[in-house]
Image (cartoon, helix red, strand yellow):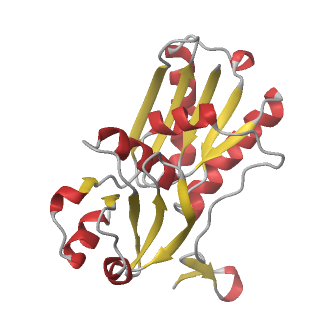
């Protein structure tokens, strides 16, 4: 198995090549925290990891892309590139979510595997969140909530991860040891690892939009912020 993974969902811009020849997977990756400018940088990263891993595009078995949640612009960039590669190379394109990648990375680092709630700051006093069991399998759908609501319904055994995890822990009055990861973005290595085992999809991956965009059309084609 050889795959190319792409992530432009949030502030980070990242690419990786995973090679699995039966032993431990080998991953060559590159990641930068850009904030903006993903479209201008991602193709250079792809070229770099392909060269560093001595991988040709024709040797790839699949393309993996992070479908969010994340910024509207960033998600469109990554999905467009992944779909383009898939179409030209006639390779399957599979999706991984930001929340799942953070959940798996956090559980692998935790002293004891327990159910986990991944919580990401979504601004506007909201968070993106999703529950996972101790194996990393999702429990329910990804959703938008608030720190207050999550703190009122936090199970006694549930771990916390993500950029808003500490805020939920503080609001719930639980020990800081329950926060096992405060990552604001997914690891490209874990996106690649999850992409290796992801099921092939009949349809092209779609962005995981959990709420309406921050920017909406205004008068005469102008864009205004909500």
- Tell whether 142 sits left or right of 63: left
Q: Between 40 and 144, which is closer to the camera in this rendering? A: 144
Residue drawn at x 46%, y 22% is 28
Which sits in the foreground, 93 or 175?
175
Asked whether the viewer can see residue 186, the reply is: no
Q: Quadrant of residue 32?
A: top left
Locate residue 21, reporting x and y percent.
58, 11
Question: Residue pushed farthest bottom?
Answer: 219
Residue 40: x, y in percent?
55, 43
Q: What residue sits 34% from the left and 62% below the top? A: 158
At 73% from the left and 39% from the top, the residue drawn is 93
Q: Where's residue 156, x and y in %?
A: 29, 68
- Residue 173 is left or right of residue 96, and the answer is left
Quarter placement of the N terminus? top right
Q: Residue at x 45, y 33 (%)?
A: 189
**Front position in the image: 117 or 147:** 117
The number of numbered badges drawn on the structure is: 0
Q: Position of residue 55 (x, y in %)?
A: 61, 14
Can see residue 84?
A: yes
Relative vertical location of residue 14 with respect to residue 9 in this rendering, above or below: above
Q: Tell me: residue 60, above or below residue 129.
A: above
């Amino acid at each position: 198995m050889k795959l190319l993974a792409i992530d432009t969902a949030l502030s980070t811009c990242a690419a990786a090549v995973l090679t699995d020849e039966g032993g431990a997977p080998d991953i060559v990756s590159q990641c930068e925290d850009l904030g903006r400018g993903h479209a201008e940088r991602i193709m250079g990263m792809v070229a770099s990891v392909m060269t560093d891993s001595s991988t040709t595009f024709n040797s790839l078995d699949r393309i993996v892309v992070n479908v969010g949640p994340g910024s509207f612009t960033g998600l469109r960039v990554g999905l467009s590139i992944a779909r383009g590669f898939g179409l030209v190379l006639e390779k399957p394109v599979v999706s991984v979510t930001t929340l799942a990648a953070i959940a798996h990375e956090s559980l692998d680092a935790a002293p004891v595997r327990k159910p986990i709630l991944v919580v990401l700051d979504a601004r506007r006093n909201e968070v993106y969140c999703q529950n996972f069991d101790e194996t990393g399998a999702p429990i329910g759908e990804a959703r938008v909530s608030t720190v207050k609501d999550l703190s009122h319904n936090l199970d006694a055994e549930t771990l916390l991860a993500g950029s808003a995890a500490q805020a939920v822990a503080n609001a719930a009055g639980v020990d800081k040891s329950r926060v096992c990861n405060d990552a604001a973005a997914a690891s490209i290595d874990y996106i690649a690892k999850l992409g290796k085992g992801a099921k092939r999809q009949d349809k092209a991956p779609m962005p995981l939009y959990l709420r309406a965009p921050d920017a909406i059309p205004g008068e005469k084609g102008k864009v205004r912020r909500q």
